[in-house]
Amino acid sequence: MFAAQIGARGRIDLVDVPDAELDGPGQILFRPTTACLCGSDLPYFDGEQHDYPLRPGLSLHEMVGEVVATTGSRFRAGDRVLAVPIGQVGFFERQVLGEERAIPIDPRLEREEIAVLAQPLGTAIFALRKLGSLIDLDVAIVGQGPMGQILAACARNLGAREIIAIDRLPARLARSPIFGATHVVASATEDPIEAVRSITGGRLVDVVIECVGHRDQTLDLCVDLCRQAGRILCFGVPPDSITVGPWRRLFDRNITLHTSVDPDFRRDFPLAMRWIADGRIDLARLVTHRYPVAEAQLAFETFRDRVDGALKVIVEIAR
């Protein structure tokens, strides 16, 4: 069977690996059919501190597909599921997963590229549960990639008053109102702090969501956007170490800092699937590009370089 392997910085190939086989109880043999790329896949593809080649299977983790066989009790062969491999090691033709790493696809969702979006939406729901009610609160979201757009849509559903989308790329900001932003701020051409002060009458915002992460993380800016006793949700995956310039301002303002990782398969992903199937949230316009698995290299480059305003890039692994 094939797997993808990142053999050098910026290069991903399909390679032959041994067939996956069930070898214990409570497992499924999973055949992914449709996947989409995530910002957390890019550090593996385009990282500066890895010893290449990386292990086969890195990096892919947002996927739906079919249960081929099982030694568990939750699923049967032929069931369509959303599955999340451990550690993003999921770019295989078939793979063995614990059955607890999968949830059923809602039968109302016929388009797999929509069903797969329950994975990133589930991570947003898990993160936002830490904040409680957003009713009547002003929210700023720094970063308007796919997750920034999803978080804006969630904030709208959860009753936020102002949803201020901040990004350097005009093409991304052009989409932000579709997903719930009440205001957009182009940080490449205007001062985001002054813009937010103007929008909020000088108060700044109750909640700031950092949705950039990695080497471009924007925690310093988030501190300066947050009002007294406000909250910052660090959603973007950070580098191993960061220096926070305005730490004293964060301290003096009594700002609460939240982090978020590892959603709950019993609650968050099933709720995300239900939101999409019920029509409570429409994420279809996040999907901007599709590629067959043979063009995985082009898919990763398109996503990394934000070609033609790329947001969610789909990889068709099998049909």
Image (tube, rainbow, N blue to C red):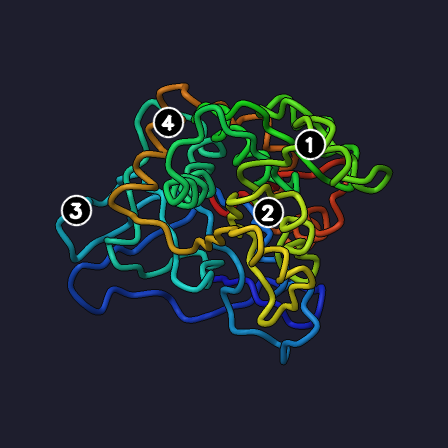
Crowd band around label 4 with a 10 angstrom C-alpha radius: few (<14), some (14–19), many (20+): some
Residue on which the image places disc 3: 74
Separation of marks 1 and 4 at Cα, in angstroms: 35 Å
Q: Vertically, is 22 above or below 275? A: below
Which sits in the foreground, 84 or 246?
246
Inspect the image, locate mark 2, and give the three-letter code of the amino acid beneath it: Cys
Question: Which amino acid is tagged 1?
Answer: Gly
Q: Which mark is residue 202?
A: 1
Question: Which residue was labeled with disc 2?
Answer: 211
Q: Secondary structure at mark 3?
A: loop
> Which amino acid type corresponds to the residue marked 3 in the rendered image?
Arg
Q: CA distance from mark 1 to mark 3?
A: 53 Å
* Residue 271 picture location, percent across and down: 32, 34
For the residues labelled 1 and 4, say whether their Cβ atoms are less than 8 Å apart. no
- Disc on the earlier residue, 2 or 4: 2
Give the mark nearer the N terminus: 2 vs 3. Answer: 3
In the displayed orientation, state which residue is furthest to the left. Answer: 73
Marks 2,4: beta carbons within 8 A: no
Amino acid type, mark 4: Trp
Q: Secondary structure at mark 2?
A: loop
Secondary structure of residue under mark 1: loop
Label 4 belongs to which residue? 275
